[in-house]
Every structure is written in structure tokens, then in C-alpha cells.
Image: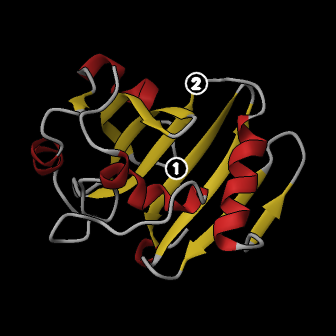
């Protein structure tokens, strides 16, 4: 199922992909799609207008494997341009939204396609490692957010978070 949001409403936080250049149509700039960093799970779910779903209690641990945050909500099929993601909203120990993690669907070549798009949008990464788990990091100066791309076979993973929280 595709989200009910238009490409313009969804792409702003993902403009790092270099897929589309646009400005938000909403009155207040969101920090990622419909969210703001620091929101509670209830606020994020409400702001999503039904797009985000709570992760079932028994699956939270398995879906919260990313850098110590608990991923408590997800968007099962978040589609932007040619990319399809399972997006997870992750919260810190205080229950505040601290990151969004996007997992590709495992289609071969997506790490390299996302890497090219991010380079087109932000230039050379501020961090770049190759090897068994390739990693690239960028800082979006305009939004003061970090974007990290990881190549985990067979998927690519993007973490999006505020630079105020560090990487």
C-alpha cells in the first residue's frame, strides 16, 4: 500500500537522496516527514494520520537493533521515487523521537543507488568506510540533521537523526 501523502510531503526529509528538490507545503517544517525530533510515540502516531503503526510489543526488541534506541512504530511500505522502505520511528530512553531508520526491501544495488543520490545531494560524505559493511555519513547543513547509509546484505539502511544528538 502506498502512503496517502504526496511525494512533496514525503520527500523533504529524504531530499538527501537527491531525488526531488522542493519545499514543504506544511506550515511548520517537520524534522522527518510528519514528525519532529523529541515527539512522544503518541504524538508521532497522531501526526502520521494513520500511516505509522505501533510495533507489536513482542517485536520491539527484534526491530530495535539500531544504536540503542527503541523502535516503537513503523511504516510498512514507505515509497519514495523508485525506493521502497520499511521505516521505523525510534525513541530514546526518555521516550523522545531520536531517529528514523529506513530499511530497503533488499533489491540488489540499492546501497549504490542511494550512495549516488546522497552524493549528488550533499557531495562527498563526511565519513566513508568500505569493507564487509560499507558506511557513508553526511550532515545536512540546512536541516542540521545527520544521514548515515549502511550496506547490510541484502538491504541498505539509512538512519536519519538530528545533529544535535550527535552521531
Which quarter shows the N terminus? top left
Q: Quadrant of residue 136?
A: bottom right
Q: Quadrant of residue 122?
A: bottom right
The answer to which of 41 and 23 lies nearer the viewer is: 23
Q: Position of residue 151 (x, y in %)?
A: 73, 40
Residue 105 numbered mark, or none = 2
102 w.r.t. 62: above or below:
below
The residue at 19%/64% (across/down) is 26
Which quarter shows the C terminus? bottom right
Task: State how far apart marks 1 and 2 are (Cα).
Answer: 21 Å
The residue at 12%/39% (across/down) is 49
The residue at 42%/66% (across/down) is 22
Say which element carries label 1: loop
Q: Point out the frontmost of discs 1 and 2.
A: 2
Q: Position of residue 7 (x, y in %)?
A: 37, 46
The answer to which of 76 and 27 lies nearer the viewer is: 27
154 w.r.t. 69: above or below:
above
Q: Position of residue 10 (x, y in %)?
A: 35, 50
Is residue 101 left or right of 45 when viewed as pictured?
right
Q: Position of residue 118 (x, y in %)?
A: 66, 60
Few, some or many C-alpha atoms within 10 Å of disc 1 (few <14, some 14-19, many ≥20)? Answer: few
Q: Quadrant of residue 30?
A: bottom left
Say which element carries label 2: loop
The residue at 56%/62% (across/down) is 16
Amino acid at each position: 500500500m502506498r502512503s496517502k501523502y504526496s511525494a512533496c510531503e514525503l520527500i523533504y526529509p529524504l531530499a538527501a537522496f537527491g531525488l526531488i528538490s522542493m519545499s514543504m507545503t506544511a506550515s511548520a517544517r517537520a524534522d522527518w516527514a510528519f514528525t519532529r525530533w523529541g515527539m512522544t510515540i503518541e504524538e508521532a502516531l497522531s501526526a502520521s494520520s494513520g500511516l505509522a503503526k505501533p510495533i507489536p510489543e513482542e517485536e520491539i526488541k527484534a526491530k530495535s537493533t539500531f544504536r540503542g534506541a527503541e523502535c516503537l512504530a513503523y511504516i510498512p511500505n514507505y515509497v519514495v521515487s523508485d525506493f521502497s522502505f520499511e521505516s521505523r520511528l525510534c525513541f530514546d530512553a526518555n521516550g523522545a523521537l531520536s531517529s528514523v531508520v529506513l530499511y530497503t526491501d533488499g533489491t540488489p544495488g540499492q546501497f549504490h543507488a542511494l550512495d549516488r543520490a546522497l552524493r549528488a545531494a550533499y557531495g562527498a560524505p563526511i565519513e566513508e568506510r568500505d569493507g564487509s559493511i560499507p558506511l557513508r555519513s553526511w550532515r545536512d547543513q540546512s536541516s542540521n540533521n545527520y544521514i548515515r547509509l549502511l550496506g547490510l546484505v541484502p538491504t541498505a539502511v539509512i538512519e536519519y537523526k538530528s545533529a544535535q544528538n550527535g552521531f
